[in-house]
Image: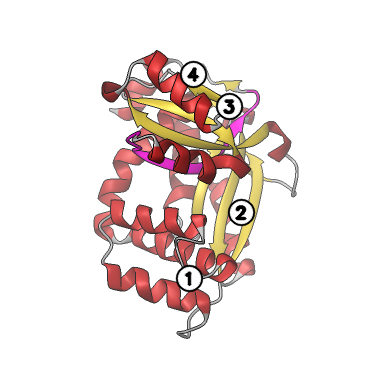
Amino acid sequence: MAGHSRWHNIKNKKAKADAIKGRMFTKVIREITIAARLGGGDPEANPRLRMAIEKAKEVNMPMENVERAIKRGTGELEGVNYEEVQYEGYGPGGVAIVVEATTDNRNRTTAEIRHIFSKYGGNLGSSGCVSFLFEDKGIINVPKDKYSEDEIFEKAIEAGAEDVIMDDPEYYEIRTASSELYKVRENLEKMGVEIAKAELTKIPTTTVQITDEETATKLMKLLDALEDNDDVQKVYANFDIPESILEKLEG
């Protein structure tokens, strides 16, 4: 399994603990606010907002928090004005890293992200320095114990998906064009397909092989520090690490 995919699985487990501390609440509230500002406060007419609300439910966020975030986004309530920013750079071993963030102070966030890169052996680069190494995609996770490979592949293609990846032991990963994610998800739901998660992501077109534990450890510390920053929404990295090393890091 590609290292970046396994790392995200590890981070998903960690996210449950983070939600208790309120870290995920902060990130989800910002996403809801921006989604409402850009596409309006009606989730039925705003697919991005609808998915953000579903994420809020996943981390057990009270609905009053969700409603306040929507109203801040639409201007019904006063609040902080967030903007979306993207950072690019390199981590240990020459791994390409893309960071998506939301901030109310671009200068502060840039300084914090630069410091994290430097502290953990990476380098913050200029806009466009590594983004060409990733493709924007939509991914939809479907439980493997619910459907056969042939059944889910047929339904996915019929719904408008591009491909189905079978690598994960628990979920089929249905991939779509980024612009088609919401449509494909709706089509699958109409077919009665159970969906565990759906999100926009970046898929690396090439990966860097990390074969020693020291470099892998430094890389993981950098990625963890980036994701733990309140302003950071998502982190993408193009690496592959042997299963034996990943198991040590996960342990």
Q: Which residue is label 4 attached to? A: 212
Q: Residues within 10 Å of mark 1 (few under 14, many from 20)?
A: many
Find out whether the residues at labels 1 and 3 contact each other: C-beta distance under 8 Å.
no
Quarter holding residue 77: bottom left
Q: In this view, does 200 lie above or below 141?
A: below
Q: Which amino acid does label 1 sit on?
A: Gly
At horizontal 43% and vertical 53% (from top left) the residue drawn is: 51
Verify CB contact (< 8 Å) between mark 4 and mark 1: no
Identify the residue at horizontal 42%, vertical 52% (top origin). 228
| Sooner in the amino-acid sequence: mark 2 or mark 3 | 2
Of the numbered discs 3 and 4, the one sitting upstream in the chain is 3
Residue corresponding to mark 3: 162
Q: Residue 230 carries which label?
A: none
Q: Name the residue under label 2.
A: 114
What SS does tag 1 mark? loop
Whole-Å distance between the Cαs marked 3 and 4? 35 Å
Q: What residue type is labelled 3?
A: Glu
Give the distance between the C-alpha atoms of the residues marked 4 and 2, in whole angstroms: 25 Å
For the point 47% across and 39% down, the residue is: 187
Relative image position of residue 131 (x, y in whole percent): 69, 40
> For the residues marked 2 and 3, what is the alpha-carbon distance in whole angstroms?
36 Å
Measured in 3D between alpha carbons, the distance from the residue under mark 1 to the one under mark 3, in whole angstroms, is: 30 Å
